[in-house]
Image: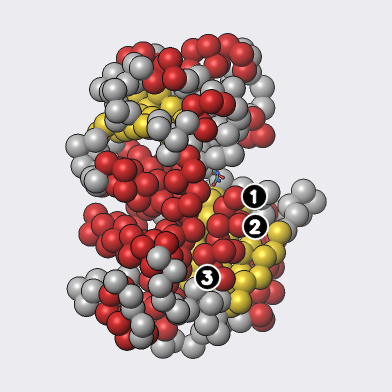
Amino acid sequence: MVHSSVSLVQEFLYPPDYQFNKKSLTQIKDLSEFDIAAILDHARKIASMNEAEQAHFKPLEGMTQINLFFENSTRTLASFELAGKRLGADVLNMAVGTSSVKKGETLIDTAVTLNAMKPDILVVRHQASGAADLLAQKVNCAVLNAGDGTHEHPTQALLDAFTIRQHFGKIARLTIAICGDILHSRVARSNIILLNAMGARVKIIAPKTLLPKHIEQLGCEVYTSLSEGLRDVDVVMALRLQTERMQGGFLPSVKEYYYYYGISHKTLELARPHAMVMHPGPANRGVEISSDLIDDTERSLVRKQVQNGVYMRQAILDLMTRYQSQEASPNNSIRHEVH
Ligand code: NCD
């Protein structure tokens, strides 16, 4: 199937029955099951177009995307940059150091500064939970959360869901275990909310010290034993031990952590025979997951996650900016005076 004209591409990509109707995306919580399913469908179309190198599809041509990263990042930043460029946007990466400045001030100052640059979309990563929402209130352009503190990381959860659906053909009724440092993980929070919305059974596995209080209220079963937690599981998501967010004694030792909670070919046997492993990266090889399991494409979806990350971000950028252009509101101005 070759799409030779832009109109054909448009028809192929945009079913008339779905329109993303939000200016910004800062949390999965704001998406309905219908939104999630439509975003996954849109990403699938974009993926097939990318893989077939079919169409000239540059809906963000003439738009400016600023990637504003207050935290170190390699893969997520690269993924957003590539996604924006593939869609034709002018992409500016701004890595902002945070050590010497107060977080609130920096964010608001930055919002004012960026306003002068007239971006169409702002992709923000910040170490404070709620930072993306705060920014979204201060600017008129679209804001996309690339991870805020321990709150949410919506594009990661969407690309994970895309990868699960690509492999299993569905999400509903699968049993998915998220294992590791749940306490510090925005990926875990976004995934629990999304997977629940899509009808999966979600299990959390972690030592007590790495479990947030009341996490079960998000709709998951909580286990502190790996062998119990992995029973009947189709997907195991391993999470990085976020030592940079740990002060003091969360764990006796990394070696002991691997002994009790490490995901390897051996411990994967506790799950269903066809179970697959995932990891948002960057992985600590030999800490939360064995090195050979990550690289084993028969059992690991990690490479697929990275590949799908670009497609998913293309899909979201496209849907969000379409909404923005339809809104026809004066672009890029600070809504409220900032004092
Ligand atoms: C995750 C993040 O930043 O929250 N990584 C990512 O997006 N590539 C998970 C992590 O840092 O462990």
Q: Is residue 258 above or below residue 86?
A: above
Q: Which residue is mark 1?
A: 73
* Label 3: which secondary element: helix
**Residue 137 location, x and y as percent?**
50, 68
Instruction: Choose mark 1 or mark 3, whichever is in front.
Output: 3
* Label 1: which secondary element: loop
Q: Is mark 1 within 8 Å of ligand 1?
A: yes
Q: Is residue 140 above or below residue 192?
A: below
70 lies left or right of 157: right
Residue at 40% over, 31% down:
299
| Three-letter code, disc 1 | Ser
Q: Are marks 3 and 2 in contact (CB under 8 Å)?
A: no
Q: Is mark 2 within 8 Å of ligand 1?
A: no
Q: Residues within 10 Å of mark 1 (few under 14, many from 20)?
A: few
Q: CA distance from mark 1 to mark 2?
A: 8 Å
Residue reaching furthest to the right = 100
**Residue 15 location, x and y as percent?**
23, 74
Q: Of the residues under marks 1 and 3, which one precedes in the sequence?
A: 1
Residue at 42% over, 16% down:
267
Q: Which residue is mark 2?
A: 69
Nearest the viewer among 85 and 131 is 85
Q: Are marks 1 and 2 in contact (CB under 8 Å)?
A: yes
**Residue 248 location, x and y as percent?**
66, 22
